Amino acid sequence: MERIVIDVEVCQKANSTLVRDEIKDIVMNSLNVIDQLLLDEPIELDKLSSDLITEHIFSIICSLKNNKFQEQNNILRITEGMGFRVFIYQATQEDAATETMQSDSEDLPVASHWILPSQEFHGLWENLCYGSNIKENLLNYIETTMEFSNRNVDSNIISWNRVVLLHGPPGTGKTSLCKALAQKATIRMHKYFTRGELVEINSHSLFSKWFSESGKLVMKLFNEIKVLLEDSESLVCILIDEVESLAHARKSCTNGTEPSDSIRVVNALLTQLDQIKRYKNVLILTTSNVTEAIDLAFVDRADIKQFIGYPDEKAIAKIYCSCIAELAKAGLIKVDPSTTDDKLAQSEATKLIKSSIGLSGRALRKIPFLAYGLFKPIDKIFDYLTFNKAMIKAVEKYKKDELKNDQ
Ligand SMILES: Nc1ncnc2c1ncn2[C@@H]1O[C@H](COP(=O)(O)OP(=O)(O)O)[C@@H](O)[C@H]1O
Ligand SMILES: [Mg+2]
């Protein structure tokens, strides 16, 4: 039988000065005495009743690489023979730096730059819910990419590269997933890289009104990126969001008579991407809100193309569950187990999930707010059942308003 390996990500507090091995011992000592684990959510550290944990550790999140073993409610019984892979990191507290470039007399924001792992992206990965193993598969791809380059696998023989394209309708978490993936890759690839960087290229300001100058800006920006890439200890993730806008720029000028600047700019970008793809420590993450219209040259460059669609029933349930837990934590609704197990409440919850099929993740995360704002009883606090009913009404209203917007 395949051995079960649990991945344990440990975020060490920023002010803790212990070395990794010491942190690992502290964590393993605590994990070895418990008999079950909550997966994919931060472990409640108080429950581990260890002063060392509270002093040095900010969070611990466990997950399974292959979650076919996963038990109900994300609870895993720990049995003998299970293995642990422990990843320890400290998150940077700084915000993103904005890289600007001079163009004529203006300073243009051309990119945002994060040092990873960053506090800002903490929990982002865990909060994205998909029906199938999209996240795990993407992470596996990236781990494979790094393993292949580490072993110098010839990409002329086995075709593989470092470009990921996530495509699908708006609001499905593509941009967030890219950022979360960069963060996760940095945490997981620690044996290859001591840290990570995320550079989000601001295509809108690079490509909107500055066409005649854009070519030069692209070159300048990539020269700076190459400087980052020269540090082989650092995993450099480049995010190019909504690449369809570039494809659009290219198309709009094929109709005109001038061989326009925009063609040159997009070509410059593609050439630069081809150049930096050779670095062992780069990861290029791209997204697109459309699938068909996207520039073929871009699609060809991506090895990993993943469609990201609307959440399925399981994912919807997970998203709503996290929303309800958050509201309960804030004391805005009252949830006790006897009310959630109630037959009527359960049937309302199922009805809510069914009525939410076809909404994007972004829309789903708005529903609880709408429900609260529109339907809160005047004189008492929401209980689980009434809140579910309010959410159903909020979904109905949301859909109606969306329809009006479309017309
Ligand atoms: N599958 C999902 N699970 C959980 N939350 C989601 C999901 N999809 C979208 N969201 C929420 O919507 C927000 C916006 O998503 P975003 O990454 O901007 O989507 P996209 O880039 O596809 O338009 C996210 O921050 C997240 O809170
Ligand atoms: Mg987006």
Image (spheres, grey):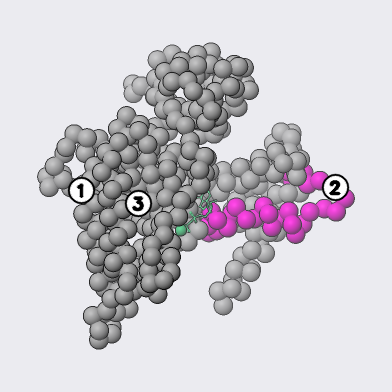
Q: Is residue 272 left or right of residue 332?
A: left
> Are the residues tagged 1 and 3 within 8 Å (C-beta)?
no
Q: Position of residue 67 (x, y in %)?
A: 42, 33
Q: Nearer the viewer, residue 48 or 362?
A: 48
Residue farthest along the bottom direction in this orientation = 257
Give the labeled residue for mark 2. Answer: 380
Q: Is residue 40 above or below residue 371?
A: above
Q: Earlier in the sequence, mark 3 or mark 2?
A: 3
Front position in the image: 160 or 219: 219
Q: Is residue 241 left or right of residue 305?
A: right
For the residue marked with disc 3, what is the amino acid? Ile
Front of the two marks 3 and 2? 3
Three-letter code, disc 2: Lys
Q: CA distance from mark 1 to mark 3?
A: 14 Å
Q: Are marks 1 and 2 in contact (CB under 8 Å)?
A: no
How far apart are the two marked residues, 3 and 2, measured between alpha carbons? 49 Å
Q: Between disc 1 and disc 2, whose residue precedes?
A: 1
- Examine the rendering and report whether any part of residue 88 can be seen: yes
Q: Quadrant of the N terminus?
A: top left
Q: Please rate how many residues cluster around mark 3, counting C-alpha atoms within 10 Å: few if below 14, some from 14 to 19, many from 20.
A: many
Q: How many marks?
A: 3
- Residue named by callout 1: 278
User: Residue at 54% of width from left, 28% of height from top?
Assistant: 15
Q: Is residue 7 magenta?
A: no
Instruction: Give the Cα separation between the discs numbered 1 and 2.
Output: 62 Å
Mark 3, residue position: 238
Look at the image and give the residue range highlighted in magenta. 358-385
Q: Is residue 94 above or below residue 82?
A: below
For residue 281, side relative to residue 43 (left or right): left
Find numbered disc 3 in the image and state the secondary structure of the residue it sits on. strand
